[in-house]
Image (tube, rainbow, N blue to C red):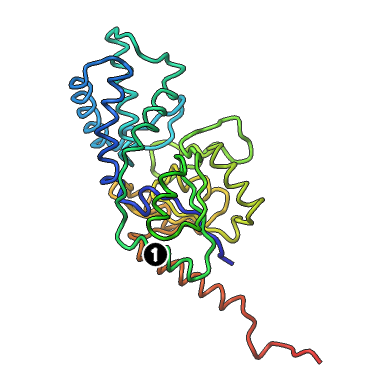
């Protein structure tokens, strides 16, 4: 019986393209400050790279040497890939004051954390109504995010849902190849490469939710808008996986999640809410013992 929901936040309940604009404006300035490069040059080069990556469906996001997603699925992924490319260009040009290769992920992550403080709150239409409807229907809800919890907790408080717990630092982009609890990858039919699913931090959070809260693959659905980050691992583990379509979603992802037994594709929060509420009502009806079959104690 479906009782619990694990929700991604940014991009599911927020309009990520709008909320990220101050982040995208600040990031090049922070990069220029730390590398002692000219701000105007960094901004111009970053814009060129961002536009190129956003327009290329075959561009990939690489973290610690692993391809973890298509690079153009969110503004944050586009930005990270752009600045990783810029770092490589600057090294080739002989610039100093750049992080060592082994430190570049930490360097970019620190820039991300600093710039993420600039993100504004822009909610999807129906965000509050969707959450309220799911709670009213009896679901237990946890938000799991790759970033820290502060911004999401602020969002939930602003919407009136401070009681919903938030688990942060899931690092859904972080692959740990030494993990053996799950297969190395899954393959979407027709896609040019496999999706790596040994996302260690994310896996440990799912395991903790199972152990401490009873959120397991039999009674829990996972909702996300980036297949490779949010849903590939839970789907492989047997969770019902609900894909909220964004303009960056690929046709192959949509087809795959429409056809696999525990997959579901929704277009907006209203459809998400309607679908989950129908499931809840159907499950309750299924598990309720019919009156005609009840045995009255004597």
Residue at 33%, 59% (x, y): give it.
267
Considering the image in quadrants, where does the N terminus appear?
bottom right
Q: Quadrant of residue 21?
A: top left
Residue 22 pos. (x, y %): 26, 38
With respect to residue 86, does 4 lie above or below?
below
Residue at the image point whose x is 33% and y is 63% from the top: 126
Residue that lies at the very extreme toward the right in this rendered image: 298
Instruction: Assign a secondary structure to mark 1.
Output: helix
Q: Name which residue lies at 49% across and 69% down.
A: 279
Measured as percent of width and height from the top left, residue 241 is found at 48, 55
Q: Nearer the viewer, residue 232 or 207?
A: 207
Above or below, comparing residue 63 to residue 226 in the picture: above
Quarter of the picture containing the C terminus is: bottom right
Seen from the viewer's position, the closer of residues 249 and 48 is: 48
Is 251 situated above or below 72?
below
Query: For residue 177, which quarter of the picture?
Result: top right
For label 1, count other residues whose C-alpha is less than 10 Å away and answer few (under 14), some (14-19) or many (20+): some
Q: Name the residue: 33% across, 18% down.
A: 34
Q: Is residue 40 left or right of residue 173?
A: left
Instruction: Name the image quarter holding residue 53.
Output: top left
Q: Which residue is mark 1?
A: 130
Q: Judge by depth and name the residue closer to the eye, 73 or 109.
A: 109
Q: How many marks?
A: 1
Q: Is residue 289 above or below residue 248?
A: below
Q: Nearer the viewer, residue 269 or 252?
A: 269
- Give x and y (percent) for residue 19: 29, 45
Q: Position of residue 60 (x, y in %)?
A: 36, 32
């Amino acid at each position: 019986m479906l009782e619990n929901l694990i929700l991604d936040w940014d991009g599911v309940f927020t309009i990520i393209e709008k909320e990220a604009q101050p982040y995208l404006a600040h990031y090049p300035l922070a990069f220029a400050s730390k590398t002692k490069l000219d701000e105007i040059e960094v901004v111009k080069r970053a814009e060129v790279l961002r536009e190129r990556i956003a327009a290329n469906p075959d561009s990939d996001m690489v973290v610690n040497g692993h391809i973890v997603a298509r690079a153009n699925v969110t503004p944050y992924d586009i930005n990270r890939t752009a600045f990783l490319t810029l770092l490589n260009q600057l090294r080739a040009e002989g610039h100093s004051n750049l992080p060592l290769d082994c430190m570049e992920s930490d360097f970019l992550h620190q820039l991300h954390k600093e710039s993420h403080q600039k993100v504004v709150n822009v909610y999807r239409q129906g965000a509050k109504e969707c959450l309220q409807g799911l709670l009213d229907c009896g679901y237990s809800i946890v938000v799991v995010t790759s970033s820290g919890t502060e911004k999401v907790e602020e969002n939930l408080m602003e919407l009136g849902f401070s009681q919903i717990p938030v688990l942060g630092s899931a690092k859904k982009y972080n692959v740990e190849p030494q993990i053996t609890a799950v297969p190395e990858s899954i393959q979407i039919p027709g896609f040019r490469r496999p999706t790596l699913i040994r996302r260690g931090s994310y896996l440990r959070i799912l395991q903790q939710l199972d152990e401490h809260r009873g959120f397991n693959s039999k009674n829990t659905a996972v909702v996300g808008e980036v297949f490779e980050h949010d849903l590939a691992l839970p789907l492989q583990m047997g969770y019902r996986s609900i894909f909220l379509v964004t303009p960056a979603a690929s046709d192959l992802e949509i087809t795959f999640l429409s056809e696999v037994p525990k997959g579901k594709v929704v277009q907006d929060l209203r459809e998400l809410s309607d679908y989950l509420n129908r499931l809840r009502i159907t499950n309750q009806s299924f598990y309720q013992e019919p009156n005609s079959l009840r045995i009255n104690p004597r």
